[in-house]
Amino acid sequence: MSWQDAHTQALLTARDEVAFGAALAQASSVLGFEYSAFGMRMPLPVSNPKFLMVNNYSHEWQQRYAKEKYLAVDPTVAHGLQSVMPVVWSDKLFGAVPEFWEDARGHGLHIGWAQSSIDVHGAVGMLTLARSHDALTPGELREQIPRMQWLAKMATEGMLRMAAAQRPNEVPVRLTAREIEVLRWTADGKTSHEVGQIMAISERTVNFHINNSLLKLGANNKTSGVIKAALLRLL
Protein backbone atom coordinates (compact mmCIF):
# COMPACT_ATOMS: atom_id res chain seq x y z
CA MET A 1 0.00 0.00 0.00
CA SER A 2 1.38 3.43 -0.96
CA TRP A 3 1.71 6.35 1.46
CA GLN A 4 -1.15 8.09 -0.32
CA ASP A 5 -3.48 5.09 -0.13
CA ALA A 6 -2.83 4.72 3.58
CA HIS A 7 -4.18 8.19 4.34
CA THR A 8 -6.69 8.91 1.58
CA GLN A 9 -9.51 6.90 3.10
CA ALA A 10 -9.26 8.59 6.49
CA LEU A 11 -9.21 12.09 5.00
CA LEU A 12 -12.05 11.52 2.55
CA THR A 13 -14.38 9.78 4.99
CA ALA A 14 -13.97 12.11 7.99
CA ARG A 15 -17.38 13.38 9.06
CA ASP A 16 -16.32 15.83 11.76
CA GLU A 17 -13.41 18.08 12.70
CA VAL A 18 -12.00 15.60 15.23
CA ALA A 19 -11.71 12.76 12.72
CA PHE A 20 -10.40 15.07 10.01
CA GLY A 21 -7.79 16.58 12.33
CA ALA A 22 -6.61 13.16 13.48
CA ALA A 23 -6.22 11.94 9.89
CA LEU A 24 -4.33 15.08 8.90
CA ALA A 25 -2.04 14.92 11.94
CA GLN A 26 -1.21 11.28 11.23
CA ALA A 27 -0.30 11.97 7.61
CA SER A 28 1.74 15.02 8.60
CA SER A 29 3.62 13.11 11.28
CA VAL A 30 4.79 10.59 8.71
CA LEU A 31 6.21 13.51 6.74
CA GLY A 32 8.20 14.65 9.78
CA PHE A 33 6.05 17.46 11.16
CA GLU A 34 4.71 17.91 14.69
CA TYR A 35 1.93 20.27 13.72
CA SER A 36 -0.59 20.40 10.91
CA ALA A 37 -3.27 22.91 10.06
CA PHE A 38 -5.79 23.13 7.29
CA GLY A 39 -7.97 26.12 6.57
CA MET A 40 -10.53 26.67 3.86
CA ARG A 41 -12.20 29.84 2.61
CA MET A 42 -15.57 29.13 1.08
CA PRO A 43 -16.45 31.17 -2.06
CA LEU A 44 -19.66 32.58 -0.57
CA PRO A 45 -20.84 34.86 0.92
CA VAL A 46 -18.70 37.48 -0.81
CA SER A 47 -18.95 40.19 1.86
CA ASN A 48 -18.12 37.91 4.78
CA PRO A 49 -16.37 34.74 3.56
CA LYS A 50 -16.73 31.69 5.76
CA PHE A 51 -13.52 30.06 6.97
CA LEU A 52 -13.23 26.46 8.16
CA MET A 53 -10.12 25.59 10.16
CA VAL A 54 -8.72 22.45 11.79
CA ASN A 55 -5.30 22.16 13.44
CA ASN A 56 -3.39 20.47 16.24
CA TYR A 57 -1.54 23.55 17.46
CA SER A 58 -1.39 24.12 21.20
CA HIS A 59 -4.56 25.44 22.78
CA GLU A 60 -2.61 28.53 23.88
CA TRP A 61 -1.53 29.35 20.31
CA GLN A 62 -5.02 28.78 18.93
CA GLN A 63 -6.42 31.23 21.49
CA ARG A 64 -3.64 33.72 20.85
CA TYR A 65 -4.10 33.54 17.06
CA ALA A 66 -7.83 34.21 17.39
CA LYS A 67 -7.50 36.92 20.03
CA GLU A 68 -4.91 38.90 18.05
CA LYS A 69 -6.82 38.37 14.78
CA TYR A 70 -3.68 37.01 13.15
CA LEU A 71 -5.71 35.52 10.31
CA ALA A 72 -6.00 39.02 8.85
CA VAL A 73 -2.21 39.61 8.81
CA ASP A 74 -0.80 36.10 8.39
CA PRO A 75 1.40 36.35 5.25
CA THR A 76 1.05 32.63 4.52
CA VAL A 77 -2.73 33.05 4.28
CA ALA A 78 -2.34 36.07 2.00
CA HIS A 79 0.05 34.11 -0.20
CA GLY A 80 -2.23 31.06 -0.33
CA LEU A 81 -5.19 33.13 -1.50
CA GLN A 82 -3.16 34.45 -4.42
CA SER A 83 -0.93 31.56 -5.46
CA VAL A 84 -0.75 27.76 -5.43
CA MET A 85 3.05 27.88 -5.19
CA PRO A 86 4.36 26.41 -1.93
CA VAL A 87 5.96 28.76 0.56
CA VAL A 88 8.51 28.08 3.30
CA TRP A 89 8.48 30.12 6.49
CA SER A 90 11.34 32.61 6.73
CA ASP A 91 12.30 35.92 8.32
CA LYS A 92 11.71 37.58 4.94
CA LEU A 93 8.20 36.12 4.61
CA PHE A 94 7.19 37.49 8.02
CA GLY A 95 9.22 40.70 7.67
CA ALA A 96 6.13 42.94 7.63
CA VAL A 97 4.68 41.35 10.79
CA PRO A 98 7.64 40.77 13.14
CA GLU A 99 5.42 40.67 16.24
CA PHE A 100 3.37 37.84 14.78
CA TRP A 101 6.51 35.90 13.78
CA GLU A 102 8.04 36.36 17.23
CA ASP A 103 4.80 35.27 18.86
CA ALA A 104 4.60 32.13 16.72
CA ARG A 105 8.16 31.13 17.56
CA GLY A 106 7.42 31.78 21.20
CA HIS A 107 4.80 29.04 20.91
CA GLY A 108 7.26 26.57 19.39
CA LEU A 109 6.48 27.20 15.73
CA HIS A 110 9.88 27.73 14.10
CA ILE A 111 9.86 25.73 10.87
CA GLY A 112 6.93 25.64 8.48
CA TRP A 113 5.74 25.08 4.96
CA ALA A 114 2.39 25.99 3.38
CA GLN A 115 0.58 24.93 0.20
CA SER A 116 -2.77 26.09 -1.08
CA SER A 117 -5.22 24.16 -3.22
CA ILE A 118 -8.20 25.52 -5.16
CA ASP A 119 -11.35 23.45 -5.62
CA VAL A 120 -13.18 23.47 -8.96
CA HIS A 121 -16.09 25.30 -7.28
CA GLY A 122 -13.95 28.12 -5.94
CA ALA A 123 -13.13 27.05 -2.38
CA VAL A 124 -9.52 27.81 -1.42
CA GLY A 125 -7.82 25.48 1.03
CA MET A 126 -4.38 25.81 2.58
CA LEU A 127 -2.30 23.15 4.29
CA THR A 128 0.38 24.19 6.77
CA LEU A 129 2.94 21.78 8.21
CA ALA A 130 5.14 22.96 11.06
CA ARG A 131 7.66 21.82 13.65
CA SER A 132 9.76 23.26 16.43
CA HIS A 133 13.22 22.29 15.14
CA ASP A 134 15.23 20.92 12.19
CA ALA A 135 15.23 23.34 9.26
CA LEU A 136 13.77 22.22 5.94
CA THR A 137 16.70 21.33 3.72
CA PRO A 138 16.61 21.55 -0.09
CA GLY A 139 16.90 17.77 -0.21
CA GLU A 140 13.93 17.26 2.10
CA LEU A 141 11.85 19.69 0.09
CA ARG A 142 12.65 17.95 -3.20
CA GLU A 143 11.68 14.61 -1.70
CA GLN A 144 8.58 15.69 0.20
CA ILE A 145 6.95 18.41 -1.92
CA PRO A 146 5.02 15.93 -4.13
CA ARG A 147 3.57 14.32 -0.99
CA MET A 148 2.83 17.69 0.59
CA GLN A 149 1.03 18.90 -2.53
CA TRP A 150 -0.95 15.67 -2.72
CA LEU A 151 -1.89 16.03 0.96
CA ALA A 152 -3.11 19.60 0.35
CA LYS A 153 -5.39 18.39 -2.44
CA MET A 154 -6.75 15.47 -0.43
CA ALA A 155 -7.34 17.73 2.57
CA THR A 156 -9.29 20.13 0.37
CA GLU A 157 -11.48 17.36 -0.96
CA GLY A 158 -11.88 15.82 2.48
CA MET A 159 -12.94 19.08 4.13
CA LEU A 160 -15.44 19.78 1.35
CA ARG A 161 -16.95 16.34 1.83
CA MET A 162 -17.07 16.84 5.59
CA ALA A 163 -18.78 20.22 5.17
CA ALA A 164 -21.31 18.72 2.73
CA ALA A 165 -22.05 15.85 5.12
CA GLN A 166 -22.81 18.38 7.86
CA ARG A 167 -25.33 20.10 5.56
CA PRO A 168 -27.23 17.14 4.05
CA ASN A 169 -30.19 19.25 2.91
CA GLU A 170 -28.11 21.74 0.94
CA VAL A 171 -28.59 21.32 -2.81
CA PRO A 172 -25.62 22.24 -5.02
CA VAL A 173 -26.24 24.88 -7.68
CA ARG A 174 -26.56 23.37 -11.14
CA LEU A 175 -27.06 25.62 -14.15
CA THR A 176 -28.02 24.45 -17.61
CA ALA A 177 -25.66 25.00 -20.53
CA ARG A 178 -27.98 27.73 -21.88
CA GLU A 179 -28.13 29.50 -18.50
CA ILE A 180 -24.33 29.44 -18.28
CA GLU A 181 -23.96 30.87 -21.77
CA VAL A 182 -26.41 33.68 -21.02
CA LEU A 183 -24.60 34.55 -17.79
CA ARG A 184 -21.23 34.53 -19.53
CA TRP A 185 -22.39 37.12 -22.07
CA THR A 186 -24.01 39.10 -19.25
CA ALA A 187 -20.69 39.01 -17.36
CA ASP A 188 -19.10 40.59 -20.43
CA GLY A 189 -21.49 43.54 -20.10
CA LYS A 190 -24.00 42.59 -22.77
CA THR A 191 -27.63 43.63 -22.33
CA SER A 192 -30.44 41.09 -22.63
CA HIS A 193 -31.20 42.45 -26.09
CA GLU A 194 -27.57 42.06 -27.19
CA VAL A 195 -27.34 38.55 -25.71
CA GLY A 196 -30.47 37.62 -27.63
CA GLN A 197 -28.94 38.80 -30.88
CA ILE A 198 -25.69 36.94 -30.23
CA MET A 199 -27.47 33.69 -29.32
CA ALA A 200 -30.24 34.08 -31.90
CA ILE A 201 -32.98 33.91 -29.29
CA SER A 202 -35.54 36.44 -28.11
CA GLU A 203 -34.85 38.96 -25.36
CA ARG A 204 -37.71 37.40 -23.45
CA THR A 205 -36.00 34.00 -23.59
CA VAL A 206 -32.75 35.56 -22.39
CA ASN A 207 -34.52 37.07 -19.39
CA PHE A 208 -36.22 33.74 -18.74
CA HIS A 209 -32.80 32.04 -18.45
CA ILE A 210 -31.43 34.87 -16.32
CA ASN A 211 -34.35 34.71 -13.90
CA ASN A 212 -34.02 30.93 -13.60
CA SER A 213 -30.31 31.34 -12.87
CA LEU A 214 -30.95 33.97 -10.20
CA LEU A 215 -33.43 31.69 -8.45
CA LYS A 216 -30.94 28.82 -8.40
CA LEU A 217 -28.12 31.07 -7.18
CA GLY A 218 -30.24 32.85 -4.58
CA ALA A 219 -29.28 36.19 -6.14
CA ASN A 220 -31.38 39.37 -6.18
CA ASN A 221 -30.10 40.84 -9.44
CA LYS A 222 -27.95 40.12 -12.48
CA THR A 223 -24.78 41.59 -11.00
CA SER A 224 -25.04 39.47 -7.87
CA GLY A 225 -25.91 36.42 -9.94
CA VAL A 226 -22.93 36.78 -12.24
CA ILE A 227 -20.56 37.30 -9.29
CA LYS A 228 -21.88 34.26 -7.44
CA ALA A 229 -21.73 32.08 -10.54
CA ALA A 230 -18.16 33.20 -11.22
CA LEU A 231 -17.02 32.58 -7.63
CA LEU A 232 -18.59 29.12 -7.75
CA ARG A 233 -16.68 28.57 -11.02
CA LEU A 234 -19.87 27.79 -12.90
CA LEU A 235 -18.89 30.06 -15.76
Image: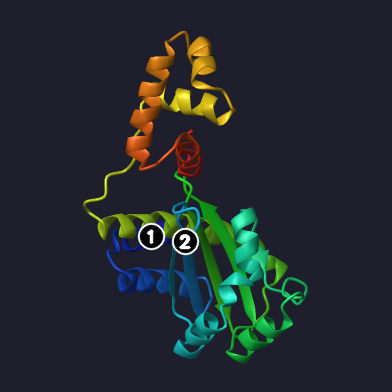
Q: Say what amino acid the circle numbered 1 marks.
A: Met
Q: What number is the disc on residue 159? A: 1
- In the rendered view, does 175 fall on the left or right side of 94? left
Given contact means CB atoms under 8 Å apart, are the residues at marks 2 and 1 in contact?
yes
Q: Is residue 65 above or below residue 118?
A: below
Q: Say what amino acid the circle numbered 2 marks.
A: Met
Can you tell which quarter of the image residue 4 is in?
bottom left
Q: Secondary structure at mark 2?
A: strand
Where residue 173 appears, as percent x and y from the top left, is 34, 40
Crowd class of label 2 (few under 14; some 14 to 19; many from 20; radius 10 Å) = many
Q: What residue is disc 2 on?
A: 40
Where residue 99 appears, as percent x and y from the top left, is 70, 85
Q: Secondary structure at mark 1?
A: helix
Name the residue nearer the viewer: 83 or 193.
193
Quarter holding the N terminus? bottom left
Residue at (48% x, 54% y) in the render: 153
- In the rendered view, does 107 fall on the left or right side of 155? right
Q: Nearer the viewer, mark 2 or mark 1?
A: 2
Name, please, the residue furthest toward the top: 200
- In the rendered view, does 85 fall on the left or right side of 26? right
Name the residue nearer the viewer: 160 or 128.
160
Residue at (48% x, 59% y) in the render: 49
Residue 2 appearing in the image: no
Name the residue nearer the viewer: 103 or 105.
103
Residue 131 appearing in the image: yes
Crowd class of label 1 (few under 14; some 14 to 19; many from 20; radius 10 Å) = many
Q: Is residue 152 above or below residue 122?
A: below
The Cα–Cα distance between marks 2 and 1, rounded to whole angstroms, is 8 Å
Where residue 203 appears, as percent x and y from the top left, is 44, 15
